[in-house]
Amino acid sequence: MAIQKMKFGIIGYPVQHSLSPILHTTAFKALDLPHSYEGIEVHPTNLRTKFKNLLENGFSGFNVTIPHKQVIMRLLDERSPEATAIGAVNTVVVRDGATIGHNTDVAGILKSLLPLQDELVGKKVMVLGTGGAAHAVMYCLLKYIHPNLVRVASRTMGRAINFVSEFDKMKGNTVLFKQLSTKENMLRMVERCDLIINTTPVGMSPHLDQSPLGDAVRFRPDQIVMDLIYTPMETTLLRRAREDGARTINGLETLIHQAAEAFKLWTGLEMPVREVREALMRKLAGVQ
Ligand code: NAP
């Protein structure tokens, strides 16, 4: 029996730089599925109307990106426990006319963090930024990794305070610190932490020479540095960490595995990760 074609897309503003269309169309093609996936640019003032139109047009699911991840929650019938805890949705499943919001960034981040689980128990982590990705990182750290301490750095102290208090109920035995991301604080924090995670967009293409920790930072070989940015695949932060002998993790595997989780929610199938990774590497090889 022929598989019925389904329509998917990513809602954002802007969306033209998103890798999700290439990622999901590669996966559909590799599995010989007739489904489509498109970038859908929706201005923030138009989200409610446009979302209703898309549902009436028979879409079966969406990814959601900046700036709609929080606001879209109010337009949905149901939300997963992860999406509720984090306060953001990046994937919508439409099933029997009902819309269900998920946060698959958690699964994507966990794919990079889980291999470190044993060595990070009782260790110290530094998280740079307090936005959507930082919420997903913090959720993973507190639910699955259980470090001894997490230091959260923001350029706005009020944001760091709110962020830490949002996770108060989840923190268990992990001590949470908030810190202003001044140059001096950051350099002191790096020295004291075992894992450093950048969730800010600082260093993302085209601002290749920028680093959220500045030029003076130094790492040790026993440290791990993770950057959620995937354009470029090696940011200035990761290059410095690699040159100092630290272990590095870029944002590509998180991107692939958050997509694999969304793909499974929509189709019930495993995403062909190898084909998708190859397509993304080809695309990203040209990104400076
Ligand atoms: P977001 O919600 O806008 O949060 C960005 C955070 O970075 C905020 O805390 C913001 O601080 C901080 N920030 C922004 N510019 C800064 C600067 N110049 N100096 C210091 N802090 C700064 O964005 P997001 O959704 O979390 O995404 C953040 C990054 O993660 C992006 O690069 C995105 O591509 C990446 N990401 C990657 C994946 C993946 O699959 N690999 C998944 C999600 C996100 P304020 O609150 O003070 O503005």
Image (tube, rainbow, N blue to C red):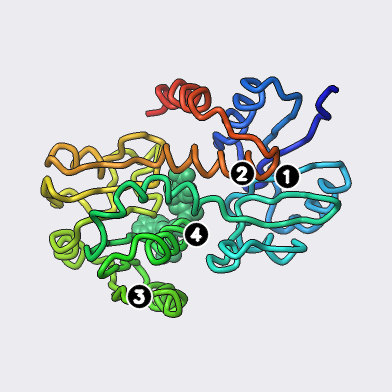
Amino acid type at image mark 4: Gly
Q: Position of residue 141 (x, y in %)?
A: 37, 61
- Depth check, mark 2 against mark 4: the one in front is 2
Quarter assignment of residue 117: bottom left
Depth check, front residue: 35 or 134 = 35
Separation of marks 1 and 2 at Cα, in angstroms = 9 Å
Task: Name the residue carrying label 1.
Answer: 61
Which of marks 2 and 3 precedes in the sequence? 3
Q: Ligand 1 near label 4 (Cβ, under 8 Å)? A: yes
Query: Relative to residue 114, is residue 242 depicted above or below?
Result: above
Which of marks 1 and 3 precedes in the sequence? 1
Task: Name the residue carrying label 4.
Answer: 132
Depth check, front residue: 143 or 214 = 143
Which of marks 4 and 2 precedes in the sequence? 4
Asked whether, in this view, residue 145 is left or right of residue 25, the answer is: left
- Depth check, mark 3 against mark 2: the one in front is 2
Separation of marks 2 and 4 at Cα, in angstroms = 17 Å
Asked whether, in this view, residue 189 is left or right of residue 83, the answer is: left
Residue at the spot 83% in from the left edge and 53% down from the top edge: 52
Amino acid type at image mark 1: Gly
Ligand 1's image quarter is bottom left
Query: Relative to residue 239, is residue 114 depicted above or below?
Result: below
- Depth check, mark 4 against mark 3: the one in front is 4
